[in-house]
Image (tube, rainbow, N blue to C red):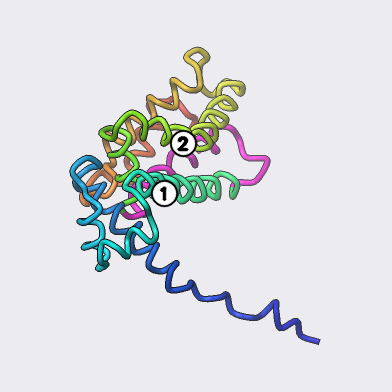
């Protein structure tokens, strides 16, 4: 007997969920383009084709909205990157895992829309209290990176010292400077991945 529940189509998002997503997408675009400080909730409402009151039904403040944009951006990036690394299987070498991590991060900058650029812009220009909350949301993401880098150091692929956290931040700086989130016409993922892995001294794979 066929299990109808197993073959039933996934439930469509509710109208409220679709509206919430529209608000988040509009906010991410504005935060990426203009930054946190000069973006108003009225502008977000207009970009989402809503009245101000409708936006406040979903988000009570700009702070709540920016926290949710950050949470969404981080969750999407972590999902994409973790899938790339886990897809190598448990027996993948530390060098292969680190290369996959670098490539997946660069891909996330290019393919996940306005969210990566919004998260980076918020990290640079938002008030301290917001940046501290953002840092808390970014900890699992940073932990994923430091874990893979520490494995590479333990395997002798990367030197120790510096610490895994310092290596991570240096790699972040290089990636974000050469493949700018949300900007077309930047260097290709392949080019930057190859350059970074060569600079790090990773073996050819």
Q: Can residue 126 be seen? A: yes
Q: Residue furthest front?
A: 53
- Whole-angstrom CA distance, mark 1 to mark 2, is 13 Å
* Secondary structure category for the residue under label 2: helix
Instruction: Work out whether residue 12 or residue 14 is closer to the camera in this orientation and state it.
Output: 14
* Residue 161 is a magenta residue: no
Q: Give the magenta part as a residue range.
A: 88-113
Residue depicted at 48% across the width and 72% down the height = 13
Give me the disc on residue 138: 2
Q: Position of residue 188 (x, y in %)?
A: 30, 46
> In screen coordinates, is 202 left or right of 127?
right
* Secondary structure category for the residue under label 1: helix
> In screen coordinates, is 19 left or right of 10?
left
- The residue at which mark 1 appears reads as 68
> In screen coordinates, is 99 left or right of 56?
right
Q: Position of residue 132 (x, y in %)?
A: 40, 30
For marks 1 and 2, the one nearer the N-term is: 1
Residue depicted at 36% across the width and 35% down the height = 130
Q: How many marks?
A: 2
Image quarter where the N terminus lies is bottom right
Q: In the rendered image of this protein, does residue 191 appear above or below residue 167? A: below
Nearest to the eye among marks 1 and 2: give it: 1
């Amino acid at each position: 007997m066929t299990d109808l529940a197993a073959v039933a189509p996934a439930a469509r998002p509710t109208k409220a969920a679709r509206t919430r997503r529209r608000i988040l997408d509009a906010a991410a675009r504005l935060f990426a383009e203009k930054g946190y400080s000069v973006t108003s909730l009225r502008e977000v409402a207009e970009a989402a084709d809503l009245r101000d009151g409708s936006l406040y039904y979903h988000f009570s403040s700009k702070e709540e909205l920016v926290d949710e944009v950050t949470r969404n951006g981080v969750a999407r990036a972590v999902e994409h990157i973790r899938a790339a690394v886990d897809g190598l299987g448990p027996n993948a070498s530390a060098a292969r895992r680190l290369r996959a991590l670098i490539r997946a991060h660069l891909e996330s900058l290019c393919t996940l829309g306005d969210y990566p650029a919004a998260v980076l812009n918020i990290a640079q220009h938002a008030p301290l209290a917001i940046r501290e909350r953002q840092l808390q949301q970014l900890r699992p993401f940073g932990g994923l990176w430091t874990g893979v880098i520490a494995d590479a150091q333990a395997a002798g692929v990367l030197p120790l010292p510096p610490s895994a956290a310092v290596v991570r931040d240096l790699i972040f700086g290089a990636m974000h400077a050469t493949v700018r989130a949300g900007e077309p016409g930047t260097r290709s993922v392949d080019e930057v991945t190859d350059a970074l892995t060569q600079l790090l001294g990773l073996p050819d794979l």
